[in-house]
Amino acid sequence: MPAKILDGKQLASQIEAELAEQVADFLENNGQQPKLAAVLVGDDPASGVYVKNKRLACERVGIDSELVRLPAETSEDELLSLIGRLNHDDEVNGILVQLPLPRQIREQKVLDAVHPLKDVDCFHPENVGLMVQGRPRYLPCTPHGCVQILHRYGIPVAGKHVVVVGRSEIVGKPVAAMFAQKDSPLGPEACNATVTLCHSRTHDLPAICRLADVLVAAIGKPRFITAEMVKPDAVVIDVGINRTEQGLCGDVDFAAVEPIASAITPVPRGVGPMTIAMLLVNTLAAARGQLA
Ligand code: NDP
């Protein structure tokens, strides 16, 4: 039987509809519109598209957004002073620094400079620490998107073996931490998994992937996960976004894996839109958390 398609785009629309009501209530009760400041340094076309999509999503739910564009030759000090200004701007609730940054700027230094209350990407060490300790202020957007997809499709992970391929700070590590938690804002069935975290030094990756009840691919290599790496009836979450000559594709060979899996996220229309929806969730939470 073909896999159930886990439609992240449709779910994100549902979440946006829920958020639009919550944002309207927030505005009515507090006389203030939540606001996101997006910082884009340089002219990488893909980054430009991501920021544009995030701002359009803000607009759809009634969140105000401001785009600050800086030239590619911006220095680290100039960017840090902008972050300082946004940290002190009472109208700005969330700050998003679009990655990657130009080579002369140390990403870590910039991400560490964002005020933790305004860190709606959940990259600041204080927020990562709180999340890993199971008392999150914010949840990181892409990992939260993965967890929400499973939750909203009624797929529990408690007691299941989740294999994550990729250990980046943005996706692999935090998604593994979230699935392994003892509790989750989404309930105990959305966590409590047995988690294996794989990377480029993992021995016999295909054999480990074949043990997965839920396989999360966050590698950045087009169609890397092949049918031989997937257990029949596994659930497959494809985080990858790769630009190829044939267009966008994920880290999973969708055509080969879809007939084997019980459920799978497509690319596009999978994790990507959910990442943006979770950014909106965090921005509203940030506005609530910053009420005087
Ligand atoms: P990174 O490049 O930071 O990390 C890639 C990870 O994959 C690393 O941990 C690396 O291992 C591992 N890896 C690379 N090659 C292999 C291999 N042959 N076998 C096993 N593991 C391997 O990528 P990101 O986590 O930032 O992004 C991953 C993908 O997700 C990209 O396609 C990106 O575009 C996409 N993405 C999508 C988002 C969305 O909203 N849908 C958001 C963010 C990212 P090692 O650590 O050993 O080098």
Image (spheres, helix red, strand yellow):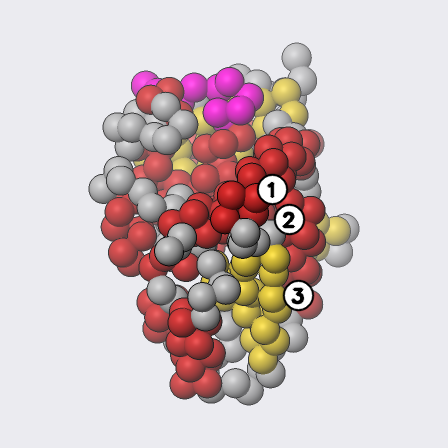
Is residue 274 among what the camera can see?
no
Q: Is residue 256 toward the left or the right of residue 206 in the image?
A: right
- Image position, residue 97 (x, y; %): 50, 66
N-terminal of the pair, mark 1 or mark 3, is 1
Q: Nearer the viewer, residue 157 or 279?
A: 279
- The Cα–Cα distance between marks 1 and 2, rounded to whole angstroms, is 7 Å
Q: Nearer the viewer, residue 160 or 179?
A: 179
Q: Which residue is mark 1?
A: 24
Residue visible at 75% across and 56% down in the picture: 245
Callout 1 amino acid: Ala
Front label number (1 vs 2):
1
Residue visible at 49% across and 63% down in the picture: 92
Is residue 290 among what the camera can see?
yes
Q: Is mark 2 within 8 Å of ligand 1?
A: no
Q: Are marks 1 and 2 in contact (CB under 8 Å)?
A: yes
Please report the bounds of the magenta region as a residue range: 150-159
Q: Is mark 3 within 8 Å of ligand 1?
A: no
- Image position, residue 47 (x, y; %): 62, 64
Q: Secondary structure at mark 1?
A: helix
Query: Magenta-highlighted stretch: main secondary structure?
Result: loop
**Image quarter of the C terminus:** bottom left
Q: Which residue is mark 3?
A: 48
Q: Secondary structure at mark 3?
A: helix
Quadrant for residue 68, please give it.
Answer: bottom right
Q: Which residue is mark 2?
A: 62
- Image position, residue 276 (x, y; %): 58, 47
